Amino acid sequence: MAVSTAKKQNGKPDTKHNIEAMREAFYERISEYDMAPLWKVMKNVVTKEPVTQCIPALWRFADAKALVLESGPLITAEEAERRVLILENPAMRGQSKITNSLFAGIQMILPGEVAPAHQHVSSAIRFVLDGEGAYTAVEGEKSIMYPGDFVITSNWAPHDHGNDSKEPMMWLDVLDFPMVNFFETSFAQQFAEKTQPTGRGDGDSLAFYGSGVLPDSVPDRRGASPIINYTYKRTRPIIERMKKAGDIDKRHGARVRYVNPVTGGPVLPTMGANLALLPAGFKGEPYRSTDGTVFVCVEGKGSTKVGDKTLEWGPNDVFVVPPWQRYAHAAATEAVLFSISDKPAQEALGIWREGH
Ligand SMILES: [Fe+2]
């Protein structure tokens, strides 16, 4: 027994070793009942500040494009279901994650290919990088995609992709499935038909819901925006106007967030997106927030200092800033940054914070 084995020094009981031995014996006993002492792990489970495995990282588009093109002859979009190369956070390899809560990947569709219709609980944000003229069909609308367009497929929305153009088409996919899988709430299914019937015109949802008016009936998308494609053509001139008006945030530049026009809230309950213009020579003030963020450089060149690491970016490069790490953007030329994070999910749970 622990008590009887306690050491004695100078004839007195060694109470320190005695109590430690008693504790260890107790932990062993309660372990048999699938119990453990919180006081031994308290500092690890209730940390003073956010702790993340995620590290800052950047993927050059030149590399990503060459590699995703190489995958073309290896597997068809149909065979793969989705031909996507995952951008894995270097500190979280094998987990299919860019941050702890988000998946990111580069998807390619070759001319004439179809990525067959399916639906799933995970929502997706697609940001078009290269090529033009491929489509995403969502709930009856076939939306033709151009670089800089931001397309959403929300929870359980049937969607398929196809490429009727003559060039390969690539986009960044960001999905919330690490979050969905954390809650163990994933469902998914394929459709018998490769493509869904499309009775709506290209741009219908943007015209109906994104023009300062709303039709009498708006589809129920479980809190997600009814707009399928927030086109770059519409959004880019707005940040240009903000720049001219001097509406430039010292940390984020001239920035807009994409909104659900029905609620004024984020485009999806789990993920939100922004588009920011950084004027040439912009030196952003440091900022941090609890939402790890995926950025895409849309135009221009610059760098982002994250902690003591500097990420140099150019067009279509993708980079990630981990949660609660201080970062500051600098623009060598006028630049446009698109960004995605899980801020809406954190806000809904009341746990989002920002600082400097
Ligand atoms: Fe999908």
Image (spheres, rainbow, N blue to C red):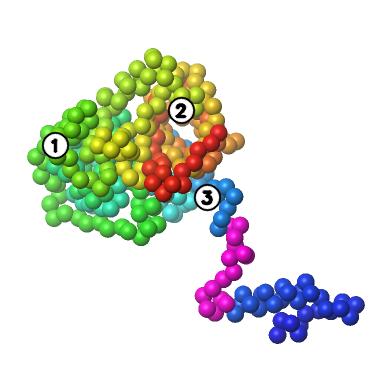
* Residue 218 sits in quarter: top left
**Would you say the residues marked 1 and 2 are in contact, meaning their CB atoms lie under 8 Å apart?**
no
Q: How far, Cα to Cα, is label 1 from label 2?
A: 36 Å
Mark nearer the viewer, 3 or 1: 1
Give residue 251's position: percent from left, percent from top. 49, 27
107 is within the stretch colored magenta: no
At a point 35% along the width and 52% down the height, the residue shown is: 177
Tell me the element at label 1: loop
Task: Reply above or below: 39 against 134.
Answer: below
Rendered-image quadrant of the C terminus: top right
The residue stretch that appears in magenta: 30-44
Residue at the disc numbered 2? 252
User: Mark 2: few, some, or many residues within 10 Å (few <14, many ≥20)?
Assistant: many
Q: Is mark 1 within 8 Å of ligand 1?
A: no
Tell me the element at label 2: loop
Q: How far, Cα to Cα, is label 3 from label 2?
A: 25 Å
Q: Which badge, 3 or 2, comes first in the chain's sequence?
A: 3
32 is within the stretch colored magenta: yes
At a point 59% along the width and 69% down the height, the residue shown is: 37
Give residue 77's position: percent from left, percent from top. 24, 47
